[in-house]
Image (cartoon, helix red, strand yellow):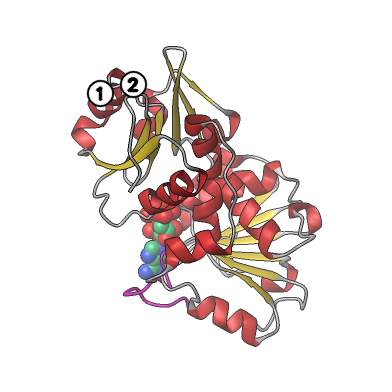
Amino acid sequence: MRLLSGHARLAGVLGWPISHSRSPRLHGYWLDSLGIDGAYLPLPVHPDRFEEGVRGLVALGFRGANVTIPHKQAAFAVCDVVDATAKRAGAVNTLVFRDGRIEGSNTDGFGFLENVRNAVPGWQASAGPAVLLGAGGAARAIAAALLDAGCPWLVLVNRSRDKAEALARDLGGPVRVAEAPPLAEAALLVNTTSLGMRGHPSLAIDLAPLPPGAVVADIVYVPLETPLLAAARARGLRAVDGLGMLLHQARPGFEAWFGTAPTVDAALREAVAGDI
Ligand code: ATR
């Protein structure tokens, strides 16, 4: 048990509900292993009181906070300044309180890219087209990050086609919407839906048309090995699970609040995922 001084740096995660979030465990692991005088708390706040909650954290001297479902759009609105990625995604997942201002960024896309880069050495977004399943908040952040990183074109496939079309319009650039995933052309296939999550239906998709060098990534991490990833591995394709995205998206916030750049390794994965 870490003892906190009167100068302890404070941060946390705002969500509703928040009890399932693994972020306190993740940041707590880094705080413990780096011996930092600081704390990272689960912060449940009702959507009606989100802004009040954020202003309360500022008043209490918090360094900042992560923001999760359902507050990412509200967080965007509360910021005095947001970075380009957050602007493109229209959503903020990391708040930093600095110099009397609320600064917002969106590190979900960064977390996604860093996860794939670490899991598949040598992988580059520019290597080929990507097919994204889903058009929600996660798809928004991942699509923006892929385009920023040089992905030549993207195809969005979503149950509600109008949502995919709205996302394609917002993103601009080489993005199209399709009814069926054009797998034969894909260098990267990403599931950003909740399909495959424990307790949800699994994703019904035949991976046979994917080229042999394709990478298949899932943002679902409960279970770690989703039916989609198992099917990819069975075909000899490279499969990337969703836990790493959670771990990597947390790095920029931790560094801003606590002053030390943390690392993602096998021990951290085990600490965060132990009981998945
Ligand atoms: P997140 O912020 O995690 O992306 P979200 O914004 O609720 O969550 O988006 C969930 C995505 O999963 C959406 O693309 C949703 O499709 P719709 O836009 O049609 O709602 C997709 N999704 C969820 N359940 C689904 C299901 N049973 N079948 C197909 N797609 C599903």
The x and y percentages for residue 43 are: 27, 40
Along the line of sight, the residue nearer the viewer: 86 or 158: 86
Q: Earlier in the sequence, mark 2 or mark 1?
A: 1
What amino acid does circle 1 point to?
Gly
Instruction: Read off the residue under disc 1.
Output: 56
Q: Quadrant of the C terminus?
A: bottom left
Q: Residue at x 56, y 28 (%)?
A: 83
| Residue 131 image point, x, y percent | 63, 62
Between 141 and 158, the one nearer to me in the picture: 141
Depicted 226 relative to depicted 59: above or below:
below
Q: Which mark is residue 3?
A: none
Three-letter residue code for mark 2: Gly
Give residue 121's quadrant in the image: bottom right
Q: Which residues are magenta?
A: 194-204
* As drawn, 95 above or below 28: above
Instruction: State ligand 1's quadrant.
Output: bottom left
Neighbor class of circle 1 (other Cα within 10 Å; few <14, some 14-19, many 20+) is: few
Front of the two marks 2 and 1: 2
Q: CA distance from mark 2 to mark 1?
A: 9 Å
Residue 35: say if magenta: no
Q: Which residue: 70% across, 76% down? A: 210
* Residue 107 visible in the current orientation: yes
Query: 1 or 159: nearer the eye?
Result: 1
Residue that appears at 24% across and 50% down: 17
Mark 1 and mark 2 in contact (Cβ < 8 Å)? no
In-image side of 221 versus 187 (left or right): left
Q: Which residue is mark 2?
A: 61
Where disc 2 sits, the SS reads: loop
- What residue sits 30% from the left and 27% below the top? 54
Q: Percent x, y for residue 79?
A: 42, 23
